[in-house]
Amino acid sequence: MSAAFDGGLPQLSIARAVEQALAEDLGSRGDLTTDATVSADATAVATFGARREGVISGVAVAEAAFQAVDTRVVFEALGRDGDRVQAGGVVARVSGPARALLTGERVALNFLCHMSGIATLTRRYVDAVQGTHARIVDTRKTTPGLRAFEKYAVRCGGGANHRSGLYDAILIKDNHIVAAGGVEPAIASARAHAGHMVKIEVEVGDLDELAQALKHPIDAVLLDNMDVKVLRKAVTMVAGRVLTEASGGVTLDTVRAIAETGVDLISVGALTHSAPILDLGLDFIS
């Protein structure tokens, strides 16, 4: 496995998410199958194995799921978030009360598979633009309640985060411009409203809108659904004065050509809204 990712998730966020997931799974009657078929004093050892190659994310969340069920479970991480894992590789080993391992299994896997899937897809995009100036970033197209986890997984895959929510940056989009009466009044109002630490980005759909936006004090432009030829012209127009972000319909087939236009950022909603899981399984070995 490769060098580990050094980022982290707040323990309180992990604990809350795990608690909610377990409550959803156990309901008011608990694990009927396990309680009916497995002795209360039975112990077991199991491993988390990768069935496909990918990038790991969510190890600490998986561990927390078992600890929330029974603190006697011993969780041994054999890989860390951000590591690449090969098909057949072992990510972690768990041991302890067999009932706890079975009860926590699905919640642990749901987080680990989902987050690792996002990290894996992100790494594919990051690898596709390697050697260019562009950085791959996510969007707010996330699963409600899981944004922090999904954006963390993007970082594990080598990507970067766009704004976390509506609260930490101003992004003036087409509907804002219409509602405000135009680009100029929208930017003027945003600049008057925002503190000096808040960045302002403006979405533009063509070169005329870009020229208009560049007349005003902004920090970034979102170049929305522009083809490669227009993107290249847009980057030339900007000439490094503000950050350039390409967005809209980006795929693994198109991302390299987009990156080669010279844009600073490429935002990809698919990282969080369409990433398939990384297939991982928990197998009892004793």
Image (cartoon, rainbow, N blue to C red):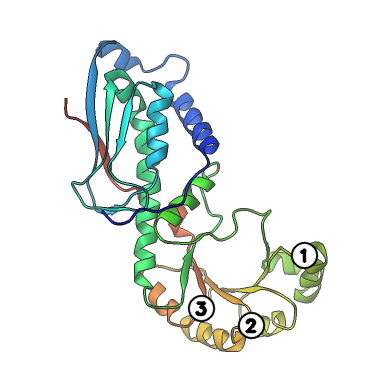
Q: CA distance from mark 2 to mark 3?
A: 12 Å
Determine whether, in the image, residue 126 is placed left or right of residue 162. Answer: left
Disc 1, SS:
helix
Residue type at the position of mark 1 = Ala
Crowd band around label 1 with a 10 angstrom C-alpha radius: few (<14), some (14–19), many (20+): few
Residue 181 relative to residue 23: left or right: right
Q: Is residue 274 visible?
A: no
Disc ID at residue 263: 3
Nearest to viewer (mark 2 / mark 3) = 2
Please indicate, yes or no, whether residue 205 appears anywhere in the rendered image. Answer: yes
Q: Secondary structure at mark 2?
A: loop
Disc number at residue 179?
1
Q: Residue 166, image x and y in percent?
A: 66, 54
Q: Say which of marks 2 and 1 sits in front.
A: 2
Q: How many marks?
A: 3
Q: Nearer the viewer, residue 47 or 206?
A: 47
Q: Which one is nearer the viewer's eye here, 65 or 182?
A: 65
Residue 210 spot, x, y in % from top left: 65, 81
* Residue at screen point 53% across, 54% down: 141
The amino acid type found where label 3 is placed reads Val
Q: Earlier in the sequence, mark 1 or mark 3?
A: 1
Contact? badges 2 and 1 (CB < 8 Å): no
Q: Which mark is residue 233?
A: none
Q: Position of residue 139 (x, y in %)?
A: 54, 59
Residue 157, by quadrant, is bottom left
Residue that badge 2 annotates: 241
Mark-to-mark CA distance, 2 and 1: 27 Å
Label 2 environment density (alpha carbons within 10 Å; few <14, some 14–19, many ≥20):
few
In the displayed structure, 258 sits above or below 125; it is below
